[in-house]
Image: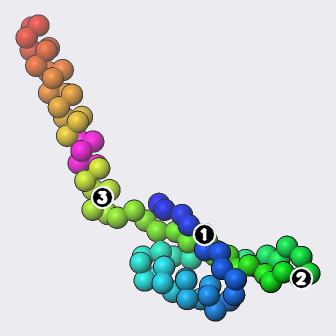
Amino acid sequence: MEYSVIQVGSINELKDAVRKMIGSGWVPLGGMNVYSSGDHGSPDYYQAMVRKLDNVASSNAQMTDLKTEINYLNDELTEWLEDH
């Protein structure tokens, strides 16, 4: 799972940024937040975003793990057979 936070200076910028990230597979996590550090500064707008890792990349990583495990077990079996 990937996690990112958008921080912009206006609600319209936030809308545009969230829409763009949704187009790339991201999903808003919770509601937006607004923070102003003082009376004179304009507020900042925040939105947490998440997305699942690419299924193909995950599948490739799982296949690599399985191949490593199979090779290890094969080596163990070969050693056992040589000893018996």
User: What residue appears at the point 55 percent right and 83 percent down from the top-left corner?
Assistant: 17
Q: Is residue 65 magenta?
A: yes
The answer to whether residue 17 shows anywhere in this view is yes
Estimate the spatial distance between the alpha carbons at disc 2 and disc 3, rounded to whole Å: 47 Å
Which of pointers 2 and 1 lies earlier in the amino acid sequence? 1
Q: Under tag 2, what secondary structure?
A: loop
What residue is pinned by disc 3? 57
- Identify which amino acid the numbered label 2 is placed on: His
Residue 5 horizontal/vertical position (percent)? 60, 69
- Position of 30 with respect to 42 (left or right) is left
Residue 40 has which mark?
Answer: 2
Q: Find disc 1 in the rendering and name its residue.
A: 5
Using the image as rendered, state which of residue 48 and residue 35 is in the foreground: 35
Range of the magenta residues?
62-66
How many neighbours does mark 1 have within 10 angstroms: few (below 14), some (14-19), or many (20 or more)? Answer: few
Considering depth in this image, is 46 or 50 the residue closer to the camera? 46
